[in-house]
Image (tube, rainbow, N blue to C red):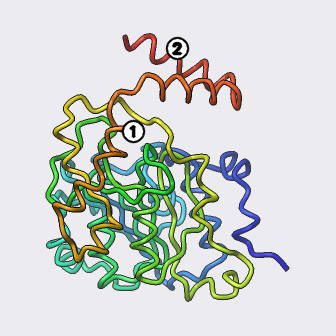
Amino acid sequence: MDSWINKIDKNKLIKDRSYSQSYQDSLIDLIFKNIKKNKNPFCVEFGYNCNSIYKNNRGNCTKLIIDHEWDYTLFDCNNENPSKNLYKHLLSSKNICKIFKKYKVPLDVDYISIDVDSIDLWLFDALLKEYKAKLFSVEHNTNYPIERAITKIENSNPYEGDRLYGASLKALNLVAEKYGYTLIWVVEELDAFFVRNDLIEKELTMFKPNLKKWRSISNTICHKPVKDKERLKECLDYEVFIKSNKNIEKSIDAAQDICKKVLLENSFREYKQFLMRQFKNPKLAFKKLIKKFFKL
């Protein structure tokens, strides 16, 4: 007998998607068909980049709210609509649990979606100290190779629309494993999904987590390059951070080599990836080339 995790069919999920940016909502449906949810299921999403709830607004929680009628709370740093349980807050690792308590988010909330393009890892870590969601999704920075655990520093500047955002898949996985969660799937260029281990104990005897499985969707160019290399000092190596007893300066220094390689403009790397995409998917490669041409 095989685990349902091993049988996840990406093509079927793409076909079944409803309102999310990619196929996140059909993946979430599949996960909650296989793990037990609360009697009154509850979801949280931040940042929720619109001021209302409507179909095709690209939110991860939208289908749970509209189609499945889950209870919910939404947060964003720019948008607010209390009539829709959407509240404006600038979240940090120091205030996020207090804010969750203010809005009565259950400690065993079913699902939390994290996507703030900056301090995602630090918010993830802060929540896990108190909140034991059944399922977390966290956006990852796909520019970094699978072997590197890189994240923006906790007190970094807001997202500027380039390659400097969030954390690498390996860095997020280190946080998840520390608190008893397993990475079961990654939606390329978007979200990593982590399930609490006690909910998949049987599956873990058949499903063997392997970060290297996601090598092909890591080290992939996403967004425009960083122009000011001084901004790379907003990144740190999370593995060095842990091993050095949270030495910020040492962790930042350790991250500079890979950040210069993948976040700054690199014509050779971009051309190489174009050729690889053309080989794997000629139509997609041509579409991206045309899109880039019209931006010039």
For residue 276, which quarter of the picture? top right
- Tell me the residue at 74%/79% (across/down): 206
Query: In terms of depth relative to the viewer, which is nearer, 124 or 276?
Result: 276
For residue 130, which quarter of the picture? bottom left
User: What is the x, y in percent for residue 43?
Assistant: 41, 70
User: What is the x, y in percent for residue 200?
Assistant: 62, 83
Q: Quadrant of the N terminus?
A: bottom right
Residue to which mark 2 is pinned: 290
- Tell me the kind of residue under disc 2: Ile
Distance of label 2 from label 1 (alpha carbons): 22 Å
Q: Is residue 168 left or right of residue 159?
A: right
User: What is the x, y in percent for residue 71?
Assistant: 40, 72
Query: In terms of depth relative to the viewer, which is nearer, 153 or 67?
Result: 153
- Tell me the residue at 21%/73% (across/down): 246
- Tell me the residue at 55%/30% (across/down): 273
Q: Is residue 21 left or right of residue 18?
A: left
Residue to which mark 1 is pinned: 262
User: What is the x, y in percent for residue 53?
Assistant: 37, 51
